[in-house]
Amino acid sequence: MSKVKKIKTKIGSGIGFFFRHLVASIDFLVNNSIGLIFTRKPQKYNTKTTNPIWKKGKAVFCFLVVLVLLYNFDNVFNVTLKPLFVFVLNLFGGNKNVYQKTLAMYSKDFANGIRVTLRLSLIGTVLGLVIGLLFSYFITLKIEHNDNKLTVFFKRFSQGFVKLYVTVFRGTPMMVQAMILYYGVKSFLNWDYAIAALVTISLNTAAYLTEVLRGSINALDKGQNEAARSLGLSSWQATKSVIYPQAIKNAMPSIGNEFVINIKDSAVLTVIPNIVDLFRIAEYASGRFAEPVAAFVIAAGIYLFLTYTVTKTLRMIEAKLDIPSVELPSAN
């Protein structure tokens, strides 16, 4: 192994070690504070929660923490990322550095831009997953010998519609989709720009996740569905209770990958007026100084930090859930 590869391996291992123990430390603190209400006994460091009530309670707690981060991100940014950026920029020129001036003047705006970006990408991915689950059910429907003509027509129509939908949304840029959806619908319905952005990213995500889930469903043993049907379950009941839990678990890496992609691709939604995300803030800041590159370098650093952190977190979750590696269609 070359020296460069050894250095990269050591750096990657160090970062992974930091994130693993950061998550374990937070988990330890939560388990031995709020968790004591449910478990009534201290829990050791880096151990799994066994209390079923606290498992659900911790999931709700984590969801509330995510909401706080999304809707109060400017304060979180000021005590976390901003000092880090200022420290790094101080190493390269102090107060006269255009990078530090940009960050000092637009730090609150950058924090708001991060919040909008994360909100769009997270909610868009969740809504896209819900739509993708429904569409993957339609596209994997099998025509059975005892189906009447109306049922056969419905199955063929729904499969054709989903295939057309996936082809259109995967074959056109999200920027073009945003323009058509916002201005096209606005011609007869005066809808909010934020809703238009969410609809765009949700529909785009649904097209990719439909294919991901279809591949995950087809990768399962067909005998499981047949066994469920033989027990008297309907097609929907078998899919909901037997197929979906396994398919979603196998597709988790691709679903997480789609979330990371949405963090980056949400920048194209700035074609919709009044969407002030991270990229739009960089545009505003670049026009303030004679060196416009600085604002976009800062934005690139923030995007990299967000995607890297989310990716590492998702990989740790996958490792904890012991998700197997399954060949699925790419979400990109």
Image (tube, rainbow, N blue to C red):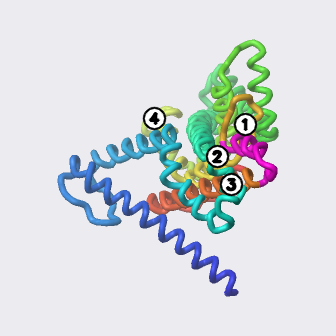
Confirm or deny contact between disc 1 and disc 4 (CB under 8 A).
no
Image: 241 above or below 50: above
What crowding class fits label 3: few (fewer than 14 Cα within 10 Å), some (14-19), or many (20 or more)? some
Mark 2 highlights which residue?
105
Mark 4 highlights which residue?
233
Give the residue type at disc 4: Leu
Confirm or deny contact between disc 4 and disc 3 (CB under 8 A).
no
Residue bounds of the magenta highlight? 278-293
Tell me residue 166's x, y (percent).
74, 37
Confirm or deny contact between disc 3 and disc 1 (CB under 8 A).
no
Tell me residue 109's x, y (percent).
62, 41
What crowding class fits label 1: few (fewer than 14 Cα within 10 Å), some (14-19), or many (20 or more)? many
- For the image, the number of numbered tags is 4
Confirm or deny contact between disc 2 and disc 1 (CB under 8 A).
no
Please indicate whether residue 228 sits to the left or right of residue 259 in the image.
Answer: left
Cα distance between the residues tagged 1 and 4: 43 Å
Confirm or deny contact between disc 2 and disc 3 (CB under 8 A).
no
From the image, state whether disc 3 or disc 1 is nearer to you.
Answer: 3
Which residue lies most toward the left here? 40
Q: Which secondary structure lies at badge 1?
A: helix
Between residue 69 and residue 312, name the one nearer to us.
69
From the image, state whether disc 2 or disc 4 is nearer to you.
Answer: 2
Mark 1 highlights which residue?
269
What crowding class fits label 4: few (fewer than 14 Cα within 10 Å), some (14-19), or many (20 or more)? some
Mark 3 highlights which residue?
298
Upstream in the sequence, badge 2 or badge 3? Answer: 2
Cα distance between the residues tagged 2 and 3: 13 Å
Upstream in the sequence, badge 3 or badge 1? Answer: 1
Image: 125 above or below 146: below
- Tell me the residue at 57%/39% (across/down): 119
